[in-house]
Image: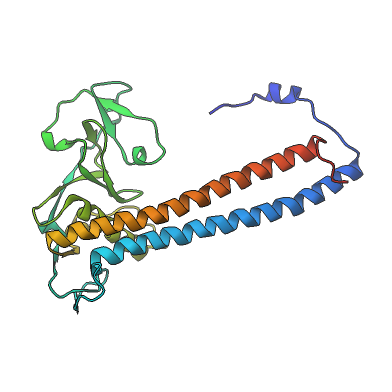
Amino acid sequence: MSRISRSTLGQIKVLIPPLEEQEAIAAWLDVKCREIDKLIATQQRRIELLQELRQSIITRAVTHGINPEAPMRPSGIDWIGDIPKHWEVCKLKFILHLINGRAYAQHELLEDGKYRILRVGNFFTNEQWYYSDLELEPDKYCNRGDLLYAWSASFGPYIWEQEKTIYHYHIWKVKISDSYLKYYAYYVLDAISSFKKGDVHGSTMTHITMDSMNNSFIPIPPIAEQQEIVGYIERETAKVDAAIGKAEQQIALLQELRQSVITEVVTGKRKVC
């Protein structure tokens, strides 16, 4: 991140309009910025609602299916609710095998090396990677296409799309039985994660235990239906993602407008009094 030193900042020249004009400029900017901020807040709320819609599409599809005419029965599981009569439910551990990553001491985290070490932060905005030269058991590496699950700090499933990498202790690799398709498993894990996040809302819990996840119940539709459900989710969430993208673009434009308005007025390029 770039920084400006105190000495450099002290050398910057600024305009000093009369006090009366400063007060008029500040008052005008307060009104104008408030208007823009309100528009930004509207778009941010729109994104929140779209994200909720996206999650509801996923959760409903993986628990209820996509045939509105299918006869239903109670599953007896809170997060699942009613399921199609011909579906089954069972504990996650009988369908998905969760494999722990490796914990590292600080001296084992290298600035360079043969393998990158995937940590939870690397799924998001953390671009700092550590490396390792250790040769580990095969199940301590993730390869392109593997299903992973972050269980600490920010939890949820991910499909790894890069080269062979060591995954950290705070991540599980998920081995899938023949009863599940990989992408259906991904969406089921996404749905159950959403439920668990809601269940701990307001608490200090920042992780999911393997025991809790293993003993959670999940639905088991026929493989053919799983494929249909995955296709449906991908089509519907693509529409929502496009709408979210447009809202994010609007926010970026409004933020640019806000800054340009401030700059033009305080530099005298735009007269408001």
Q: Position of residue 236 (x, y in %)?
A: 35, 58
- 52 left or right, relative to 173: right
- 84 left or right, relative to 121: left
- Which of the pair 196/243 is nearer the observer? 243
Which residue shows up at 73% across the image and 42% down it? 261
Q: Position of residue 171 (x, y in %)?
A: 25, 44
Q: How is the image coloured?
A: rainbow
User: Is 269 drawn above or below residue 73 in the view shown?
Assistant: above
Residue 203 visible, this orientation: no
Q: Residue furthest left?
A: 178
- Which of the pair 187/173 is nearer the observer? 187
Which residue shows up at 31% across the image and 38% down it? 119
User: Is 188 drawn above or below residue 107 in the view shown?
Assistant: below
Q: Position of residue 104 (x, y in %)?
A: 25, 33
Residue 19 visible, this orientation: yes
Residue 118 sits in which quadrant? Answer: top left
- 126 left or right, relative to 221: right
Which residue shows up at 76% across the image and 38% down it? 264
Residue 205 sits in which quadrant? Answer: bottom left
- 244 left or right, relative to 73: right
Which residue shows up at 31% across the image and 52% down it? 207
- Which of the pair 75/98 is nearer the observer? 75
Q: How many marks?
A: 0
User: Is 136 drawn above or below residue 183 in the view shown?
Assistant: above
